[in-house]
């Protein structure tokens, strides 16, 4: 249902005149995310509390207009886009760190807190919040929870779900619930916290989160290893994991991606390098030195060319800057990309990378790969020019071929970006119909009118088929 003038007046009275956008030029700023789609919301709201969000949802539920929650809009799958119109609820005003409990190693935060701001705040107290998506300078904790975001440190520390102990959530009917605990253990009833984590803003709007913290590790060691062949780099990753060393992060960057950053900045990477591993270890000094020696040996055994160990904080930052510059620098190849965050068992990374090379040759498209090799999560970027119809078709064929390869290798089509609209046509390649039906039943239970973030995860909400392409 389309909102009318009276709905807008009621919404204005809920959030206040200065906290609603209705002009087209302003709404357009909230029509995008990191995909190239554009969906204009009817209005953008900036509530300041769970109570205001509850009143918005109550009105939306009564009038039947869609509501789409939004953090920083950095998602790669269209999750924050109002594909069926209605209002966008931006959580950016709810950005307070409410508490850092140093005794119990907990933080209580509002959803609009930027991940990197939380990291810095806890590190100042000698504490550590491990989930570190490469977008941490701008993405929000609410968006991280909704997507179950990961990052380079997931190899050792896991992903967002491993740090969320409890949530306050506004449900589609306007009810406000508290889930979970503020303790390390807790098994009373179903684990609703885990259900909300990764639910892509389709079951409720997170308005507060209780997060687990860790003590900040004593020391870090960051090294960069170059390889002449990307498959050798991938084999080195498998060898490191097999050896029993648990690195904090193992990031892989293939030759095509290296070319992009080399074009844009002086990196000091010589020609002929087809893969880089960025490896980080943390812990106490003694164990790090021992693990670093093993990692170096394993890289050399797998034809590593050159090993550079960062000797200062500045050098560590420079190495990570190279990794974080990758995603934006791909635009040098082609204006458009289909960025897939597939995961395979770590022993299968060499098969994935050589399989993607075959797809790249077959479709005549460049497909740079990089990402969190330590947990088997590789970002496969199919580059194309959307103005070229033939190339666009081949790009989508390439995506399908990559997903088929991933499922064949025993992997999953999304490790951290979620389904949104981008992967909705493909979920049946991985999930069997009975499982999809259970998921749809859960959505119906929470949101029988289908007003919260409609059009996401499932291609067809009810009564139809989610058969893939
Ligand atoms: C350069 C770049 C690098 C990236 N690197 C990584 C990476 O390493 N790892 C990774 O996991 N992701 C990465 N991402 C993807 C993205 O940053 C993450 O998915 C992030 O968690 C999204 O946060 P956001 O605040 O931008 O959320 P948005 O994009 O605004 O929203 C994402 C989803 O969350 C929902 N949502 C937002 N807030 C709430 C809330 N309070 N309650 C309920 N639902 C909500 C939205 O409806 C939407 O479905 C990267 C993105 C970019 C652009």
Image (cartoon, rainbow, N blue to C red):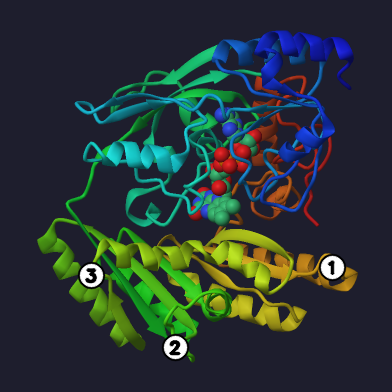
Residue 373, position as x, y percentages in the image: 44, 66
Determine if residue 405 is in view.
Answer: no
Q: Residue at x 56, y 17 (%)?
A: 48
Q: Earlier in the sequence, mark 2 or mark 1?
A: 2
Q: Earlier in the sequence, mark 3 or mark 2?
A: 2
Residue 129, position as x, y percentages in the image: 34, 41
Residue 296, position as x, y percentages in the image: 25, 78
In the picture, the disc for residue 169 is none
Residue in the foreground of this view, choosing between 405 and 141: 141
Residue in the foreground of this view, choosing between 238 and 40: 40
Circle 3 SS class:
loop
Provide the residue designation for mark 2: 270
Quarter of the image holding residue 259? bottom right
Q: Residue at x 72, y 37 (%)?
A: 30
In the picture, the disc for residue 311 is 3
Crowding at mark 3 (Cα within 10 Å: few <14, some 14-19, many 20+): few
Residue 32, position as x, y percentages in the image: 73, 44
Residue in the foreground of this view, choosing between 462 and 172: 172
Of circles 2 and 1, the one toward us is 2
**Is 54 rendered above or below residue 203?**
above
- Residues under labels 2 and 1: Cα distance? 35 Å
Q: Residue at x 49, y 28 (%)?
A: 95
Provide the residue designation for mark 1: 393
- Say left or right for 445 vs 271: right
- Residues under labels 3 and 2: Cα distance? 20 Å
Crowding at mark 1 (Cα within 10 Å: few <14, some 14-19, many 20+): few
Quadrant in which the N terminus is drawn: top right
């Amino acid at each position: 249902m389309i909102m009318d003038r009276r709905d807008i007046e009621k919404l204005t009275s809920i959030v206040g005149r200065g906290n609603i956008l209705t002009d087209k030029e302003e709404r357009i700023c909230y029509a995008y995310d990191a995909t190239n789609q554009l969906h204009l919301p009817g209005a953008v709201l900036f509530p300041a509390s769970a109570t205001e969000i509850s009143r918005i949802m109550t009105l939306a539920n009564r009038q039947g207009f869609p509501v789409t929650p939004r953090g920083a809009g950095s998602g790669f799958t269209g999750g924050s886009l109002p594909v069926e119109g209605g209002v966008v609820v931006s959580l950016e005003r709810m950005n307070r760190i409410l508490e850092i409990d140093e005794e119990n190693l907990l933080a209580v935060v509002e959803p609009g807190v930027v991940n990197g701001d939380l990291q810095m705040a806890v590190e100042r107290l000698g504490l550590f919040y491990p989930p570190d998506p490469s977008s941490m300078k701008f993405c929000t904790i609410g968006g991280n929870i909704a997507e179950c975001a990961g990052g380079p440190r997931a190899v050792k520390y896991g992903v967002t779900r491993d740090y969320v102990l409890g949530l306050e959530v506004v449900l589609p009917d306007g009810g406000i619930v508290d889930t979970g605990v503020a303790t390390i253990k807790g098994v009373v009833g179903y684990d609703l916290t885990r259900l909300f984590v990764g639910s892509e803003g389709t079951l409720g709007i997170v308005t507060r989160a209780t997060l687990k913290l860790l003590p900040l590790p004593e020391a870090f060691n960051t090294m960069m290893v170059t390889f002449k062949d990307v498959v050798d780099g991938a084999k080195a990753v498998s060898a490191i994991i097999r050896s029993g060393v648990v690195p904090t992060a193992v990031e892989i960057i293939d030759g095509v991606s290296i070319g992009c950053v080399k074009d844009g900045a002086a990196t000091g990477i010589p020609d002929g390098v087809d893969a880089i591993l960025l490896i980080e270890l943390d812990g106490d000094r003694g164990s790090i030195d021992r693990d670093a020696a093993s990692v170096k040996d394993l890289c050399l055994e797998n034809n590593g060319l050159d090993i550079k160990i960062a000797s200062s904080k500045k050098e560590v930052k420079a190495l990570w800057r190279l990794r974080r510059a990758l995603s934006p620098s791909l635009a040098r190849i082609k204006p458009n990309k289909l960025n897939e965050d597939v995961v395979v068992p770590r022993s299968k990374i060499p098969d994935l990378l050589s399989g993607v090379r075959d797809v790249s040759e077959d479709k005549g498209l460049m497909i740079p790969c990089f990402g969190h090799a330590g947990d088997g999560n590789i970002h496969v970027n199919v580059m194309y020019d959307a103005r070229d119809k033939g190339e666009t078709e081949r790009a989508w064929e390439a995506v399908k071929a990559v997903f088929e390869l991933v499922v064949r290798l025993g992997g999953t089509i999304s490790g951290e970006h979620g389904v949104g609209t981008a992967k909705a046509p493909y979920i049946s390649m991985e999930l069997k119909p009975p499982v999809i039906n259970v998921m749809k039943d859960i959505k119906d239970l929470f949101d029988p009118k289908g007003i919260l973030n409609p059009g996401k995860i499932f291609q067809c909400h009810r009564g139809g088929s989610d058969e893939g392409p």
